Image: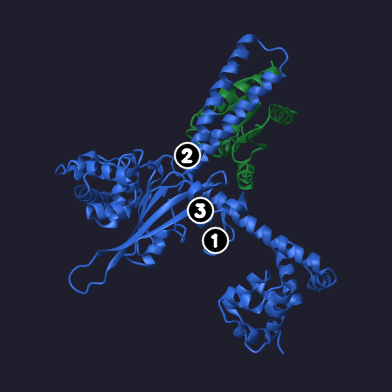
Chain colours: A blue, B green
Amino acid sequence: MTERALAGSRIRQRRIAQGLKQAELAAHVGISASYLNLIEHNRRRIGGKLLTALAERLEVEPSLLAEGAERAVIARLSDVAERLGESADTGEAADFAARFPGWANLMIRAGRRVDELERNVETLTDRLTHDPHLAATLHEVLSTVTAIRSTASILNETKEIEPEWRDRFHRNMSEDAGRLAEGAQALVGFLDGAGDAQSEIGSPQEEVAAFLSAHGWHFPALEEDREGAGQDYVNGAPQLKSASARSIALKVLDCYAEDARKMPLDAARKAVEAQGPDPLALAQHFGADLAAVMRRLASLPESEAVRGLGLVVCDASGTMLLRKPAEGFAVPRFGAACPLWPLFSALNRPMVPLCERVMQPGRAGEEVHFEAYAVAQAVLGEGYNAAPLYEATMLIVPADPADEGGRARPIGASCRICPRQDCAARREPSIITQAL
Amino acid sequence: MGKTVLLVEDEPNIIEAIGFILSRDGWTVHTHSNGQTALDAIRERSPDLIVLDVMLPGRSGIDILKDIRADEQMGKTPVMMLTARGQEKDREAAREAGADRFMTKPFSNSEVLAAVRELAAP
C-alpha cells in the first residue's frame, strides 16, 4: 500500500490520540461519520481541502498525514535549514528525526513561527514605508524623545551648569513634553482612523464619508427643504475632490431630504423621545420603510434619546456604501468588515428586520455592547420582471452590558485587527495578537 | 582651539543638547538645519567631523553624504548619521553612501560622545 493510501490509518491514530470521536471530527470538517470511517480504513483516498481541514483539527501538518512522519519531517527540517540559509545533509536530518522526534518537531514549529513573524514584520514595515503620515509622525515622536532624553541627561549629570543654560534646558524640556503629547495624540488619532482625513482619503466613498463626518451627518438646510440646498452643500465641500464623490454625495443628500420630508425633525425627535431609537416602532409611526428610519435616526442631532448612533449601508456584494462609526464600534476604513455583522445576515434574509445584541472587543480588552438593527431592502426595480438589487442597512445603538442577559453575540471589526483567535469566520491572522 | 564638528540636524532642541555636550568636551560646534544648503555649510566650515541627520528638510542626509564622498576636498571627513529609522536596510543605505557610523534615535549623550571621540581619533 502507498504512503498516501495509509493516510487514513494515520488520521485514525491521531484522532484516537486526541480523544476525539469519529462523529465529532467528521462534523468539524463537514463530512458524515460513515465517510470518515471509510477514510480511516483506507478505503477512500483523501487529499486537497479535506486533508487540510482534518490536519488542522488534528493539529498536525497535512504532509504528516499524507506521507507519514519521517518523510514529512525530513522535508520540513530541510526546509527550515534552507530558510535560515544553512545547507542540511538529508541523511543527517533523517538520523536527527529518527533519534530525536520531539526536538525535530520543535524545530519545525520554531521554523514555522519564524515564517509567521517575518510575514508580520513585513506587513508592519510595509505599512510604515508606504504611509508617509505615520512615518513622519513616528519620526517626530522619536526626535522629540531624543531631545528630552539628551536634555534630561545633561540636567541630571552635569554638576556645574550655568543658570542660563539650566533655564534654557528646562524650557526646552517643557516645549518637548508638549510636542511629545501632540505627537502621541496624532499617532492615536491616525491609528484610530481619525487622523487627517484629507491626506488619507482615497476612494470617492471615503471622500463622501469625510464630508458627512465634517457635517456631523446633519444638514439643517435640508431639514428646511430649501431648494438647491444639497447642491450648495456639495459645491462648497473641500472634502469632495472628485466628480464621483460629488455625484455620490448629491444622491446621499437627495435621500436625506426625502427622509426628512417623511420624518420632519421635530416630529422625529418627539417620536424618538417617546419610543426610543427603535426603528420598527418608528417605521410604523411614520409609515416609512425601515432603512429610511435607520438613516434618519443616524442623522438626528445628538440628544439624550439619540446618542452615539452608528450606521452602515452596504450593497449585495458587501461593499460598504455609507459608514458612520458608533463610539466603540469600529468600522474598517479599508477592506472587508467582519462577516458576523447582522448587516450581512440581513442580506441572506431580504425584507426581514433583524435585531440582535452584539459585542465588539474594546481597546482595553473589554467587551463593548450594541443593539444592532438591520434590514436588506430592494432598492431598484425598473419596469416589470426586473431582478431586484438589494442594499442592507444596519443601525448601531450603544447598549448597556448590564442588561444583556448573556445573549450578546461576539463580533469584530475586521480580521486584521480582531483579537478573537478561535473565530470560525476568520479570513486571515490578526496583526494585533500575532505581531504585538 | 579644539577640533570642529558640524551638526546638521533640523530639531533645534537636539542641536542645543548635543551642541552643549560636545562644547563641554572641547569641540568647536557649528550647526546647520537645512538639507538643501548643508553642502555649502560643510564647504565653508571644513569641519573635522560631521554629524548628519538622515531626514532633513529640503534634502535627504543620505544624498548629502553621497555628495560629500564624491567631493575631493571634503570626501574623507568622518560622518556619523543620525536617524529615527534603525532598520537594516536604512543602515545598509547609510553604509553604501559612505557613513562611518550610524546612530538610531533615541540615543544617549554618552553614546554620541563616545562615537564622536572615536571617529575623531587619529
Dot 1 or dot 3, earlier in sequence: 3
| Whether residue A4 is visible | no
Bin the neighbour count of mark 1 within 10 Å (Cα to Cα): few under 14, some 14-19, many 20 and up: few
Bin the neighbour count of mark 2 within 10 Å (Cα to Cα): few under 14, some 14-19, many 20 and up: few
Would you name the residue on which mark 2 appears?
A189
- Residue found at the far left of this picture: A227
Q: Which mark is residue A428?
A: 1
- Using the image, determine if residue A209 lies above or below residue A386: above
Q: Nearer the viewer, residue A253 or B46?
A: A253
Chain for disc number 1: A
Q: Position of residue A145 (x, y in %)?
A: 60, 30
| Whether residue A238 is visible | yes
Would you name the residue on which mark 3 appears?
A405
Q: Nearer the viewer, residue A316 or B76?
A: A316
Q: Which residue type does callout 3 highlight?
A: Gly
- Residue found at the far top of this picture: A163
Q: Which residue type does callout 2 highlight?
A: Gly
Residues under labels 3 and 2: Cα distance? 34 Å
Relative to A100, A234 lies left or right:
left
Q: SS at mark 1?
A: loop
Is disc 3 in contact with disc 2, using a CB cutoff of under 8 Å? no
Residues under labels 1 and 3: Cα distance? 31 Å
Q: Nearer the viewer, residue A273 or A366?
A: A273
Residues under labels 1 and 2: Cα distance? 25 Å
Q: Are marks 3 and 2 on the same chain?
A: yes
Q: Nearer the viewer, residue B81 or A317?
A: A317
Q: Which residue type does callout 1 highlight?
A: Glu
Of tags 1 and 3, the one toward the viewer is: 3
